Each structure stands twice: as C-alpha cells, then as structure tokens.
Amino acid sequence: MINGIEEKEFQRVEGGVCAAAGFQANGLNCGLNKNKEKNDLGLVVSDVLCSAAAVYTTNKVKGAPILVTKKHLAATGGKTRGFIVNSKNANTCNADGEEKAERMCELAAKALGVNPEEIVVASTGVIGEILPIEPIAAHVEELAAGLSPQGHAKAANAIMTTDTVMKEVAVEFTVGGKVCRMGGMAKGSGMIHPNMATTLNFITTDAAVSSEMLQKALRDVVKVTYNCLSVDGDTSTNDTVLLMASGLAGNDEIAAEGEDYDNFKSALYFVMMHMTRMLAKDGEGATKLIECTCGGAPDLETAIIVAKSVIRSPLLKCAVFGEDANWGRILCAIGYAEADFDIDKVDVDISSTGGCVAVCRNGAGVAFSEEEAKAVLSADEIGIAIDLHQGDVSAKAWGCDLTYDYVKINGDYRT
Amino acid sequence: MINGIEEKEFQRVEGGVCAAAGFQANGLNCGLNKNKEKNDLGLVVSDVLCSAAAVYTTNKVKGAPILVTKKHLAATGGKTRGFIVNSKNANTCNADGEEKAERMCELAAKALGVNPEEIVVASTGVIGEILPIEPIAAHVEELAAGLSPQGHAKAANAIMTTDTVMKEVAVEFTVGGKVCRMGGMAKGSGMIHPNMATTLNFITTDAAVSSEMLQKALRDVVKVTYNCLSVDGDTSTNDTVLLMASGLAGNDEIAAEGEDYDNFKSALYFVMMHMTRMLAKDGEGATKLIECTCGGAPDLETAIIVAKSVIRSPLLKCAVFGEDANWGRILCAIGYAEADFDIDKVDVDISSTGGCVAVCRNGAGVAFSEEEAKAVLSADEIGIAIDLHQGDVSAKAWGCDLTYDYVKINGDYRT
C-alpha cells in the first residue's frame, strides 16, 4: 500500500481517451492559436450517455467553463455525452465568460444533435482576455464531422499549452470477469500546485460505475495523485478533472465498495499516477522529475504533507537542476512541513538509475561520496526517500527541477 | 494606519548597529570564507547589560545557535551583553552543533571578560557541514580587541552570504523627551519566506524598555514586516531576529503600553520595514522589488494573507521580471489566498515611478494601454494595489521578481 491505495501493474494499451469502447475524439486548429500546426479546439464524445464525476480548482477565481460544467452536470444528474475544450484562452475573469462557455456547449450539441446540457466545457490559456467565439463557431461542424476512435491524439494535442509532450495513458483491467479499458489525456506544465495540480485532465472508461462511486473513486485518487504534484506553487483558475464511464464493457454496474470497486480504483490510480508523473516531468522548463516518497509516517496526512513540502521547495528544485547534493535543503523542507513528527529520527536517501546514496541519518548529515551523489543526480528521474521512523504509512509526491527555462517561459507568457 | 501600526517618518542617522549609545562592533575574515576580502565573523557588544527580545524560525530543524541563544536568554532572564555571529556555515544538523555554538559564546565571553551566558550566538551558511571551530578560536581575541563604535559595517559585512548589498538602517526618535536611537543590520537573500522571512537580523537601541515590552513590540512588528516578506517560499532553519535595548538614552523605562511605547514601536516598524524592503530588493537574483498593498480588507489577517499570496506567486514574479503586465496572474494569486472575501468586488492597479495603470475592476479585466503598463513595469520598484472593497484595513507585503540568476545561484550553492 502506498498513498492508501493498492498499487497494481496493468497492461498498457494505445488509444488515450478513445481506448475505452464507445468514445470518439477530434481536434483541429480553429485559429485561436496562430500556429496552424497546433490544435486549439478538441471534442470528445461517447456513443451513449455516461456517468460522470469531476473535481475542480479550489481557487476563488473559477474559470467560466467550470461554472457551466457544474451547472450542466447538476441539471443532468451527473450524466454527460462529452466535452468541448479549447486552449490559448482560459475564458476566465471576463464579463461574458459564462455566456461564451454556454455558447461552446450549444455549438457542440447542435453539431452532435444532442441536448446542450449533455455537453460540458473546459478552456485553458491566458486569463482575462475576451474569448473570440467566431473561430469556434466556424469550425465546430468540421470538428464533429471528423470524430473517430482514432482521434484521441488530435484532442490531446488541442489541450496542450506550454506542454512539450502530449500526455496520454490507457490501460486494460478486469471487473467481474469483463475486460474493461480506461484512458486519459492531460495538459499542464506551469501554474501547477496542490490543490489541484493540473489544469485539464479527462479520463474515459467503458466500465459501468454509478456516478456516486465514480465521484468517490475520483476524489480519493485525485488526493494522492494530482494533489501531490507541484510544479511551481501556483494554483490555476481552470483546473478540471473529468471522469466519464460509458458502461459499454458490460460489467454489472459498480454501485458499492468491494472487490470490483477496488480493482477499478487501482486502475484509476495507475492512469492518474502515470499522468501525474508525465505532468511533473514536463513541468515548465523542467529537465528532471523529482519523486519524493515519505515512509515511516504515523498516518497518510503526515506522509503526504512531508512529501509535498519537499517537492515544492524552490531551493531544492534549483539544487536538483544543478545536480548538487545539497541535502540540507531536503531536511529544511521536511522541517517546515506542517505536521507532527520528531525531526531527530528522520533518514534521507537519494536515488536514481545512477545508484542510491544515504545523506542523512537521525536528522544529521552522514559522510557520502560526492562522486556517487553526482552519479545519482545526473539521471533525469530523481528519487528522494524519507523515513520518519514513526509508523508504517507511505505516500509519494511528484515535482520537477527549477530551471532558467521556467523563468524564460513565464517572463513573457502572453506573447 | 497600515499593517495595524501608525506609520511615521523618522530622521535617519548613520551607524547601523552602533548608532545607539553604548554599542560597539567588529568583523573580520577568520578563514571560514576563502575570499579574504569578505568578513565571516562578527561581534556586537553593549557597554552595559541589555534587555533583549528575540524571535526565531518556525522550522522544526532549528540551527544549534538558536538552541543555545534561547538557553542563554532564559538563564539570564532575557539579558545579554552581545552576540557573536559567523557566516558560511549554518552549524545546523550537526551532531556537535550545540557544543560548537556554546564554544563560540565561551570564546567571545572570555575575550570580553563576561559570563558566557551573557553572550548569544548566530550562524548562517551551508546546512549539515561540521563547523570548524579553530578559525574562530584563533581570531576571537583580535575580533574583541578591534571593537569600536565605527565597526558596524564590518559586522554587517560579516553576516552577508549571497547578499549583494550590506543592509543597515538607523533612526533617531524621542521617548519621554529623551532623544533615542535605534539601528539594525540584516542578512538574507534566499530561503526567505513567511514565517519568518529573514535569516539573521540584529537591532540595537539605547531606549530603556523592559524585556516584556520589547518582546511584545518585536512580535507585533515582525508579524507585519519580516513575516510579510517572501523571496522564494523556503523557510530557513536559522532565522533569528534579536533586539537589544541598553537603556543608555536615559528615558524612563517603557514598561507598559502608552504613548512612549507607541513611539518606540513606530520606530521599530520603520527600521524593520526598511530592512524588509532591502531584503526583498536584494532577493537572490532579483532585479525588482515588488510591494503589494491590500486595502479594503475586513481585517488585518485577510489583508496580510492576500498581500502575501500575491508576492509569493512564482508566475507573477516571472512576469514582473519579464515586464509583462499579465494581471490575470495577480487575480489568480488573490483567488487562491486562503481568506474569505468576494472575488467579484476586487480592483487591482499596478504602479511605479513610471505611472499607474488600472488593470482589473470588479474581478474582471479592463482595457489598458500596453505601452503605459510597460512604462510602469520598467521601473525597479513595482507597486501592486489591491482593493477588496470589503472594509477599511490595509496591509503590505514585499517580494521580488524571479530571474535566471536565482536559478543560477541556487543550482550550485555549495561550491
């Protein structure tokens, strides 16, 4: 058990958000992004009405698309046919934001021949600039006409902003003897911080799960995946994780806890954990993934708080970029974590494919070879293992190094 | 009233920690720092036993010098003759840390002919490397022999680490008809974050103030100065603010609240606020000071939380570095501030010697001239004024931009 969830390995499959039966997707450039090679408008639709669950940013400034999505899911009792999404403009802090977000749903619904309330919406990009609806209106028919089970990558491309790689994960799992699939796509690179830790994330499955159990699983898994991810300490205004279940796999609907639910939840953890790692590794300007595991904790809260505190320290992030084994900064970040434990019992190791080095025992430094430490830190995925020696609960958190490029990207984001 | 304190102007004077009557200082290079031009050992002593007050880091990892300073102040009932301080090594997370810190006090006390418990100690620098005591022992006699009222700058130089400028402020003020003086020195550049927001800071005064009132004033003023400063979101292990009052100005001791106490507190605010600004402006790699004023708040806590949230946003800090008027990031940071207010009433202006531009009204963007915004942001001190329109309380917080040099300095700090 880590992060309070049974970690299992699953068979990976291709297909992203279209890996599960009954989902189609498409993406295109409608002109919001001046780079015609880059999609800026995406659509993902299920053949049948899905159960849906969602979690959103905790920021008081909430993007207009979030308000509209919440309203639509409330109106349909947590059911949806799909979503329309754009990048380059967050449609946030604009007087006409809700009107525009509603209009996006109407346009998509008309093209699909469904009820506008059965469509939800998301946007990502610059805050506070009016969203031009014309380019979207002019391309929505083309977008819907091009939907296909092969369109997942076009949609995944459409949600990217400063992301340098497309983020898709899909797996196969079994529920009640039926083979099910689940796939997701995510975008996010900067302005990523607990809670939540992603801007946009969409997961589809053909497992049959009630809306209630879907929401429960999503809330539990978000807590130990996206909410344990920090790139820069900023919390975005548009963060949304949407989980849709079509039920086309034919399993008996998961409507209560039990073996089927645990299996489903483990698959969801696998998908979201791997997307979390991809988000961390592709953090704005990042060259290295940092995975911090806090073990020996008295409870999950303590383990999470300590692991998160370490991966968000700007000083540690710079040291990792510089491949400098400045472990005092790890201990410093453990020390200001707002949790109750004895700092004098803490052990710290750093590790990677380049080896493992013990740097701290009982809260004090131990002699180590700088050469070995350098070998560990020269890898592009760095592990930091903390043992509090005060229990047997473990949690992981994910982050990345802080580099010149982070500053460069964000010094002039709007141009 | 701002920050809950009466803001007054005071006559500035020269002399740093020696501006007040009865204080002498010295600093030299003892060899901890290989750069012989840079002092690494300082000593500040009062002719008479002083009342003292101190506040320390909230980090669980506390530097050994903090433990020893606390012990000594407890043993003397809050009295001290002075302090010895070194840079380059934090004497933290070392098994022999307390022993070494005690030894520093003993060495200084012997050279001065006073009781070791009447001396306190501070260290700053790398965490987790054993502090070599020999260089200090070999130079402490010379350090004490060279004490003088002109030695303040030598001591201020000794506490600098990555600081690019020396930080001293001193003022004259009047208590009960007697002219008093107060002066301080500070160091700190990175690992600066509420709470506390400085690594080392020492303030001396010749006003007569009881230890109790000294502690009360210090706690109140730290809350709205150093604790409203963030450079990078890390909280150091060795933060110490020490305030010493010799009483040599001859005023009737301030032993209760009243006009004299308010005057003293305003002077303390002036000194600490100006040192806070100097620390922010000299943040590691910083090119610009950011001063955020949150007005229209229902209470001081809300005003402080909102102002702090803005100045610590890495995305905003990068935008200020890039002179990009990306005000959506200001609103985003206001939005994730953990306080209770209506985001739809918020106004935001940015200003500097280059002018003033309104960027947000009622939580939504307003059209502004990019040219005028550029003129504002090209200055080296940037003001961000927030009006919550929900009360009449104001607070300020201070930060700096995030630049390539921050990454460079911290990518390889130990070498």
Image (cartoon, coloured by chain):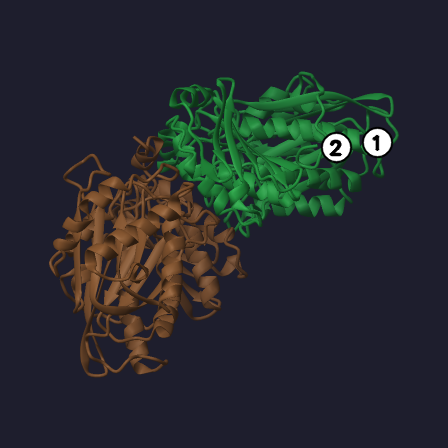
Chain colours: A green, B brown
Please tell me whether mark 2 sits on a helix, a strand or a loop. helix
Figure disc tally = 2
**Image location of residue A381, percent across then percent down:** 50, 23
Write down the quadrant of residue B287 in the picture: top left
Which subunit holds the residue at mark 1?
A: A
Write down the quadrant of residue A195 in the picture: top right
**Are labels 2 and 1 on one chain?**
yes
Q: Amino acid at mark 1?
A: Glu
- Relative depth, front residue between A27 and A254: A254
Q: Which residue is mark 2?
A: A265
- Relative depth, front residue between B174 and B251: B251
Which subunit holds the residue at mark 2?
A: A
Q: Is residue B277 above or below residue A215?
A: below
**Image location of residue A391, percent across then percent down:** 65, 41
Q: Amino acid at mark 2?
A: Lys
Q: Which residue is mark 1?
A: A259
Residue B292 in view:
no
Residue B189 in view:
yes
Is the C terminus of chain A in the top left, top right, bottom left or bottom right quadrant?
Answer: top left
**Distance from the alpha carbon under mark 2 to that under mark 1:** 10 Å
Is the N terminus of chain A in the top left, top right, bottom left or bottom right quadrant?
Answer: top right
**Image location of residue A340, percent across then percent down:** 58, 50
Please tell me whether mark 1 sits on a helix, a strand or a loop. helix
